[in-house]
C-alpha cells in the first residue's frame, strides 16, 4: 500500500518570463518539496486575468510557465499539475467562500491596500483601476487551497497574508457548521537560501528590470552576464569574492571546488572582471543549456503539453468534486447530483 503523504499545494501565476530568481526562489524549492509531499501545483490562469487582458499574452504566458516548470524537472506523473481554469469546482467554492468572507478582511489585503495607496498618492480616486478580481483575489486563492485540503502551501513572503486569510475563511466556515469541514493549511515560507542578485546588484526581480531569463538564447545569456555591473578595480588588484555579484551568482551554479578556485583567483589578483564573467557564463550555461533545450522542445509540441495538463486536470477534478459534494451537503445545498 502506498504510504499516506502530507499534501503540498501551490499556485503559479503566469504573468511573465521565468528568470533565474524564480528558478532558485520558487521552482527548485517546490520540486524538492514534491519529493516528500503529495504535491499539487497549478497554473493560476484566472488570477492572471486580473492584470493580463490580452488573450494572446495570457495564452502564451500559461504555456510558457507550464513548459518552464516541466523543463526544470517537474514530473507530471508524480505531481498533479493542472490549470486552475480546468477545475471549475474552484469557482463554485469561491462563491461559497464569498459568503464567509467579510469585506473588512479584503480591505486589509496588502495588494489592494497598495493599489489604493498609490492612487491616493497620484491624487486619483482610491479605487481607480481596482477591479473586483483584484479586490477578491484572496477568496479565489482560498478556494484554490481549500479545495484540495493541503497541509502546507509553499509560498513567497508576499503571499503569507493570503494564506492566513484562507485560514481565517476556513475557520469561520468550520465554526458556523460546528464541524472540521476544512483542514487549516499552513504557509511554508521559503527561507531565503540565497538572495539571487540581479544584473545591477539589487535582488533579481522583474519589477527592477534586472533579470536573467531562464530560457533565453545562449547569446543573450552571455550578453547579459557581460553587462553585470562591477566596480572599477583593475585586473591586478586582489578582489573580495563575497561582495561581488558575479561571485554570488557563481555560488548558485558552481561546485564547491569551483567556488574555492574562483575565490582564490579573486583574492590573489591578476584576474579581471571580464574573465570572472566568462567563468560565470560557463557554469550558468552548463546548467541552463539542457533546460533551454527541453523548454524549446516542449514549446514546440503544443498537443503534448496540452495533454499533460489535461491529464493533471483529470486527476485533480475527482478530488475537487469530492470536496464540493461534502461541502454542499454541509451547507444545505442538496438535491443536486
Ligand atoms: N497568489 C499567488 C502568487 O501571486 C499565486 C497563487 C494563486 C497561489 N493561488 C494560489 C499560491 C494558491 C498558493 C496557493 O504568487
Image (tube, rainbow, N blue to C red):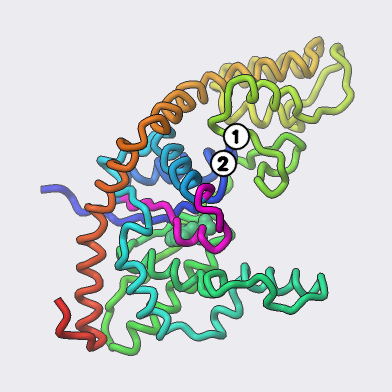
Instruction: Please give the residue where the numbered disc 1 appears in the rendered image.
Output: 213
Foreground pick, 295 / 113: 295
69 w.r.t. 241: above or below: below
Q: Position of residue 228 (x, y in %)?
A: 75, 29
Query: What x and y, as percent, mark residue 10?
Result: 41, 55
Q: Is residue 218 above or below residue 327?
A: above
**Residue sitting at x 35%, y 83%:** 173
Q: Which residues are magenta?
A: 39-57
Give residue 46's quadrant in the image. bottom left
User: Which picture quadrant has residue 113?
Assistant: bottom right
Label 2, residues with CA under 10 Å away: few <14, some 14-19, many ≥20: some
Which disc, if any, is residue 71?
A: none
Secondary structure type for disc 1: loop
Is 30 situated above or below 232?
below
> At which x and y percent is residue 287?
51, 23
Q: Answer yes or no: do the residues labelled 1 and 2 have beta carbons within 8 Å?
A: yes
Left or right: 100 with respect to 107?
A: left
Residue 96 on the magenta span: no
Locate residue 172: give its quadrant. Answer: bottom left
Tell which of 124 and 37 is nearer to you: 124
Q: Residue at x 78, y 19 (%)?
A: 273
Q: Which residue is mark 2?
A: 17
Q: Report the quarter where the C terminus lies.
A: bottom left
Q: Considering only vertical position in the picture, is 140 above or below 206?
A: below
Considering the numbered disc 2 on the image, is that residue within a helix, a strand or a loop? loop
Amino acid at each position: 500500500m502506498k504510504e499516506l503523504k502530507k499534501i503540498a499545494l501551490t499556485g503559479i501565476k503566469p504573468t511573465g518570463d521565468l528568470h533565474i530568481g524564480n528558478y532558485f526562489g520558487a521552482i527548485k524549492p517546490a520540486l524538492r518539496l514534491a519529493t516528500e509531499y503529495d504535491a499539487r501545483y497549478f497554473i493560476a490562469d484566472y488570477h492572471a486575468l486580473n492584470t493580463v487582458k490580452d488573450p494572446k499574452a495570457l495564452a502564451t504566458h500559461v504555456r510558457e510557465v507550464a513548459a518552464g516548470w516541466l523543463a526544470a524537472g517537474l514530473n507530471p506523473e508524480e505531481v498533479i499539475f493542472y490549470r486552475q481554469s480546468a477545475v471549475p469546482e474552484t469557482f463554485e467554492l469561491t462563491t461559497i467562500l464569498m459568503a464567509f468572507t467579510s469585506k473588512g478582511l479584503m480591505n486589509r489585503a496588502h495588494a489592494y491596500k497598495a493599489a489604493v495607496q498609490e492612487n491616493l498618492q497620484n491624487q486619483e480616486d482610491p479605487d481607480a483601476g481596482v477591479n473586483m478580481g483584484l479586490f477578491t483575489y484572496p477568496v479565489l486563492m482560498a478556494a484554490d487551497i481549500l479545495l484540495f485540503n493541503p497541509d502546507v502551501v509553499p509560498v513567497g513572503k508576499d503571499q503569507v497574508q493570503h494564506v492566513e486569510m484562507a485560514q481565517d475563511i476556513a475557520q469561520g466556515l468550520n465554526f458556523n457548521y460546528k464541524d472540521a469541514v476544512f483542514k487549516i493549511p499552513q504557509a511554508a515560507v521559503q527561507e531565503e537560501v540565497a538572495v539571487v542578485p540581479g544584473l545591477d546588484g539589487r535582488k533579481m526581480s522583474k519589477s527592477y528590470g534586472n533579470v536573467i531569463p531562464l530560457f533565453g538564447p545562449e547569446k543573450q545569456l552571455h550578453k547579459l552576464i557581460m553587462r553585470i555591473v562591477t566596480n572599477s578595480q583593475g585586473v591586478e588588484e586582489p578582489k573580495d569574492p563575497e561582495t561581488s555579484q558575479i561571485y554570488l551568482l557563481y555560488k548558485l551554479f558552481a561546485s564547491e571546488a569551483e567556488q574555492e578556485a574562483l575565490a582564490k583567483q579573486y583574492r590573489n589578483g591578476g584576474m579581471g572582471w571580464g574573465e570572472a564573467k566568462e567563468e560565470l557564463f560557463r557554469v550558468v550555461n552548463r546548467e541552463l543549456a539542457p533546460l533551454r533545450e527541453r523548454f524549446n522542445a516542449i514549446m514546440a509540441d503544443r498537443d503534448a503539453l496540452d495533454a499533460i495538463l489535461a491529464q493533471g486536470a483529470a486527476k485533480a477534478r475527482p478530488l475537487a468534486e469530492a470536496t464540493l459534494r461534502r461541502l454542499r451537503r454541509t451547507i444545505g445545498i442538496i438535491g443536486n447530483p
